[in-house]
Image: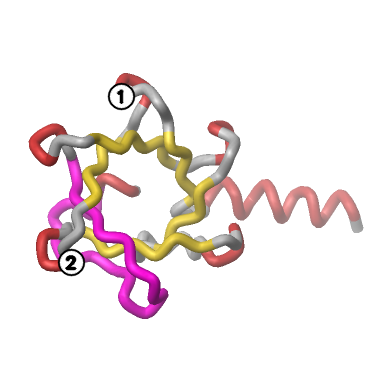
Amino acid sequence: MKRNLFLFTVFLSFFSQAQIVYSTDWKSDADVIVYVTEWKSDADLIVFKTDWKSDASGNNDGIWFFTDWKSDAKKQIYFTDWKSDANIIVYFTEWKSDAGWKNKSKQHLFY
C-alpha cells in the first residue's frame, strides 16, 4: 500500500502544473519576474495567496502557494520594484474567487 501511495504521489507531481512558487532573492534565478501593482485594473493576473499547498490546483488559475523550498516549486519568481523589468504584473486579492488571468497572452509564463 505504501508503495502504491508513493508511486501515485510521484505520478501526480510529475504531471501537475500546480502554482507552487518560490520567491527568490536573485533575479538571475527567476523563471518569471513579477511586479506587484496596487491597482486591479493594471494587472495581467489577479493572484490569491493560499496557505494550503493542496489549494494550488494546477490549473494555472492564479491561486499561488509560496513554498519555503526551491526544490518544491514549479516556478521561481523574483519580485521587482520596476514595472518595466517585469514579465508579468500581478495584483494580490483577498478573495479566492477573484483570482484569474486578465491578460491570457501571458498565461504561458506559468506552464
Q: CA distance from mark 2 to mark 1?
A: 24 Å
In the depicted structure, whether residue 16 falls above or below residue 75: below
**Quarter where residue 39 is shown:** bottom left
Residue in the picture at 54% in, 32% down: 70
Residue type at tag 2: Lys
What residue is shown with label 1?
27
Q: Nearer the viewer, residue 78 or 58?
A: 78
Disc 1 is placed on an element classified as helix
Horizontal and vertical percent position of residue 36: 24, 49
**Quarter where residue 62 is shown:** bottom left
Q: Nearer the viewer, residue 92 or 11?
A: 92
Sequence-earlier tag: 2 or 1: 1
Residue type at tag 1: Lys
Q: Nearer the viewer, residue 32 or 66?
A: 66
With 75 as the anchor, is 33 left or right in this view? Answer: left
Residue in the picture at 91% in, 58% down: 1
Residue in the picture at 21% in, 36% down: 81
